[in-house]
Image (spheres, rainbow, N blue to C red):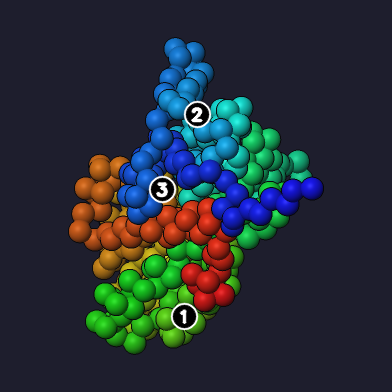
Amino acid sequence: MHHVHHDLKVYGGIKLFVGTGSPELGQNVADYLDQPISGRDLIEFPNENLFVKLHGSVRGQDVYVIQSTAAPVHRNLMELLIMIQTLRLDSAARITAVVPYLCYGRSDKKDQPRVPITARLVADMIEVAGADRYMTLDPHAGQVQGFFSIPGDVLTAVHLLIDHVNKCIRPAMYDPVVVSVDLGFAKKGRNFAADMDMPIAFIEKRRHGNDANAEALTLIGDVKDRDVIIVDDEVDTGGSISQAVNVVKQNGARDVYLVFVHPILSHNGAERLAALPIKHIITTDSAPISPEKMKILGERITVLSIAPLLGEVIKRAHEGRSVGEMFNE
């Protein structure tokens, strides 16, 4: 009877594949890991069907597919699923779906009759396609983790944002206060405020109907004659955050800063933010911001890269080391 002693690394080398949903971020992760991006052909036929062909074998390898599922959402999601299935059929040893921004995160519960739980459907699709693990960043609702049966790393970019605020903005702020954009974000907002050792205020808003528009109502807390940091997990059309800025300004706030993880900026979201009486925006590259939108926002936006975070987690996952240690957990 021969006893085989495996090293900690039970898989072959790291193979990185990058979808069209996050090319720059994928390249930055590859640079961090000092790994090449593996070649693949991605063809869209005239009937909009997608086709993937790998340039080389991934048999026995530890494969990571980096793909954000921001707009175009359905194209990016299908591309992710088809790439995962292609890798599975080529006998990859382990496939990890690295999805910095996971689509349908808001469709996480049946909060009214006759509606879907699409976040669960997306999780099921990623598993059925053949993913063994997943990584994502700051999901809109924590329970999304429970929709996956496969193990995953649910990461946060909040510490990146906080470090930047403390280093570059905090020293010049007057009597600062954190404002949570709504009560749904209150718990995360409170953690934000605690980590920055600032007080917190909340905006109460009530949503009417199923469209993306909501009505901001009242401010709970004090912002008068204080600099304000408005925090949220993602900004889509910019409606909620615009209302939040207006409410704090009406209540006597001084300079206003916006801090959020996912810059989705649909439709005229960038124009809407650019028109606000704000000092600065701090966000990440979890979803790509087009050059046109960056031009609209000009020097008032700072985009922090999550590539070192993703790169380090991929490295630790590959080597079978703790990810929690990165966050002193």
Marks 2/1: CA–CA distance: 46 Å
First-in-chain label (2 vs 1): 2
Three-letter amino acid code at disc 3?
Ala
Q: Secondary structure at mark 2?
A: loop
Three-letter amino acid code at disc 1?
Asp
Query: Are the residues tagged 2 and 3 within 8 Å (C-beta)?
Result: no
Residue at 49% from the left image edge and 82% from the top image edge: 194
Residue at 53% from the left image edge and 57% from the top image edge: 319
Q: Residues within 10 Å of mark 1 (few under 14, many from 20)?
A: some
Three-letter amino acid code at disc 2?
Ser
Q: Position of residue 11 (x, y in %)?
A: 57, 46
Q: Is residue 99 visible?
A: no
Residue denoted by label 3: 287
Query: Are the residues tagged 3 and 1 within 8 Å (C-beta)?
Result: no
The quadrant of the image that shows the C terminus is: bottom right
Relative horizontal placement of residue 307, taking residue 214 as reference (left or right): left
Residue denoted by label 2: 57
Q: Secondary structure at mark 1?
A: helix
Q: Residues within 10 Å of mark 2 (few under 14, many from 20)?
A: few
Relative horizontal placement of residue 217, taking residue 291 as reference (left or right): right
Q: Position of residue 57 (x, y in %)?
A: 50, 29
Residue at 20% from the left image edge and 59% from the top image edge: 299
Query: Viewer-proximal residue, 159 or 107?
Result: 159
Q: Position of residue 277 (x, y in %)?
A: 28, 65
Please say if 52 is above or below 222: above
Q: Position of residue 110 (x, y in %)?
A: 73, 49
